[in-house]
Amino acid sequence: MELDDRKLKILQAIIRTYLETGEPVGSRTISKYTDLNLSSATIRNEMSDLEDMGYIIQPHTSAGRIPSDKGYRLYVDTMLETKDREVEDMKLMLATKADKLENILKQVARLLAENTNYTTMISKPRYKHKKIKFIQLTLVSDTQLLVVVVIDGNIVKNKFISLADVIDQETITQLNFLMNTSLNGLDLTEINMAIVHTMKEQAGRYSDLAGSIIDSIVEAVGEEDEYGVYTSGATNLLKYPELNDKERATRLLATLEEKEALSNWMNEDEDTNTEHGIQVYIGDESPVEAMRDCSVVTATYRIEEGVYGKIGIVGPKRMDYERVVGTLENTMKQLDDIFKNKNKD
């Protein structure tokens, strides 16, 4: 006799039900599982086969069935295989990201929300040090110059400059050389007045234009993406009675939707003693007022040196802290592997 998919699903349903109730499980109970869509008679026949195969036993005449040791062993082995596949699926999902970091973070937020049944927040990567890697000046027209700046993390910033006079390509090439030799490798904080003064002197008659280009570079590098936080599972919080009254729920959902307060908090750079900066905020410890009735657990992910972001899980104060911290640690390790491999490419 073969243990086909239907028998396996029925066996899993019997074991899960028995684990929850501690009572022998009958066919009528199993027939209520909507994903099976089987009649009680069909389930009784399958249960009889499972009993003959040694996966379940009947402790008393006319009673339901309970798992045997053999049944438990199959359940545990199958469960472990499933968990291993889930981890590998997450690795594969993350590995396909390559140049699509935004999509990865959104998918991670969704997966965490689904797996924890809480709300997830993930901030976009931030750059502790914004070193200039490359500058490119391009004439778009007689009256416009495009300034392209590449900073650490291969982040590209663009700015347009209006030109008062027609500039030839040779002058643009010379200015491009001046900008790269003077500014490449410098952090934004290292561009001081002395450097600017020297560069403007070297630009000669084009000192004003050089000054405008430097201003546009500083402005572009200093810009931050507005409200760079992805959220998922916001309505999960409404499943918990202590959080679903109208006033409290409105504040929470508005905060998760507007994201301004979340962005300010999630983008803070905190000194922590743990590898991934695991932090637990309970009730009034939360810097976000709308979350003072919740608990929030955050962790820090790092793409490379100086490039980091945060992941946060929001739930009721009675959240399963051990599970949440474990889930975050596991997710951080998966992200570490992905980013480490990406940086080698």
Image (spheres, rainbow, N blue to C red):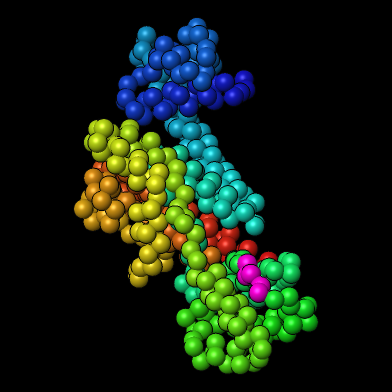
Toward the top, the furthest residue is 41
Residue at 45 percent of width and 43 percent of height: 232
156 lies above or below 289: below
Q: List x then y, in percent, for residue 124.
A: 49, 58
Q: Residue 116: in sight, yes or no?
A: no
Q: Quadrant of residue 281?
A: bottom left
Toward the left, the furthest residue is 284
121 lies above or below 344: above
Q: List x then y, in percent, for residue 199.
A: 60, 89
Residue at 49 percent of width and 43 percent of height: 111
Residues 172 and 333: in front is: 172
Residue 162 drawn in magenta: yes
Residues 285 and 342: in front is: 285
Residues 249 and 331: in front is: 249
In the image, the segment drawn in magenta is 160-164
66 lies above or below 239: above
Residue 41 drawn in magenta: no
Image quarter in which the C terminus is found:
bottom right
Image quarter in which the N terminus is found:
top right
Q: Residue 86: in sight, yes or no?
A: yes
Predominant SS of the magenta segment = strand
Relative horizontal placement of residue 25, taking residue 250 as reference (left or right): right
58 lies above or below 300: above
Relative horizontal placement of residue 250, taking residue 330 as reference (left or right): left
Q: List x then y, in percent, for residue 270.
A: 35, 68
